[in-house]
Image (spheres, rainbow, N blue to C red):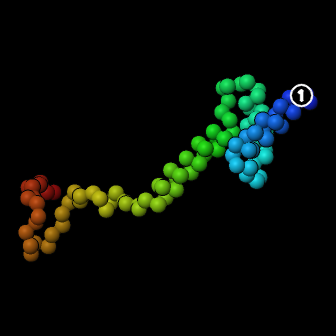
């Protein structure tokens, strides 16, 4: 990498760092984002966009984990109603053929 390009990346990474409020530990992300921006390759997402997308996916996953699990058996109506014959059936029983 040429010294001029390296200096441009350093300057842009510094600007990104300032824009984000000078967070600690984000130097590599800022460097890679600056390199992406200065490469002129618009087909690639910046690292920040990838991180934001990952955060959204994590949020959806956490929301799904918090939702109660309802089994299908608890929500389906039984096909067969079993009675002892002491009380009438809740549904009309159809005549069936036996063996």
Q: Nearer the viewer, residue 87 or 95?
A: 87
Residue at 34%, 57% (x, y): give it: 72
Residue 85 lies, with reference to residue 40, above or below; the image says below
Please indicate, yes or no, whether residue 32 appears anywhere in the rendered image.
Answer: no
Task: Please identify the quarter of the rendering in which residue 93 is found.
Answer: bottom left
Label 1: how many Cα within 10 Å (few below 14, some 14–19, many 20+): few
Residue at 67%, 25% (x, y): give it: 42
Which quarter of the rendering shows the N terminus?
top right
Q: Which residue is mark 1?
A: 4
89 relative to 60 in the view: left or right:
left
Q: Secondary structure at mark 1?
A: helix
Residue 53 lies, with reference to residue 93, above or below; the image says above
* Residue 38 percent coordinates (x, y): 76, 28
Residue at 20%, 60% (x, y): give it: 80
* Residue that sits furthest to the right in the current view: 3
Which quarter of the rendering shows the C terminus?
bottom left
* Residue 50 percent coordinates (x, y): 64, 40
């Amino acid at each position: 990498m040429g010294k001029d390009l390296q200096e441009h990346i350093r300057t842009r990474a510094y600007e990104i760092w300032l824009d984000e409020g000078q967070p600690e530990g984000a130097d590599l992300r800022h460097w890679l984002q600056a390199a992406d921006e200065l490469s002129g390759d618009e087909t690639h997402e910046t690292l920040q966009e990838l991180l934001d997308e990952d955060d959204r996916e994590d949020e959806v996953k956490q929301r799904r984990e918090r939702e109660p699990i309802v089994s299908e058996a608890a929500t389906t109506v039984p096909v067969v109603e079993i009675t002892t014959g002491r009380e009438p059936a809740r549904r009309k029983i159809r005549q069936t053929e036996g063996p």
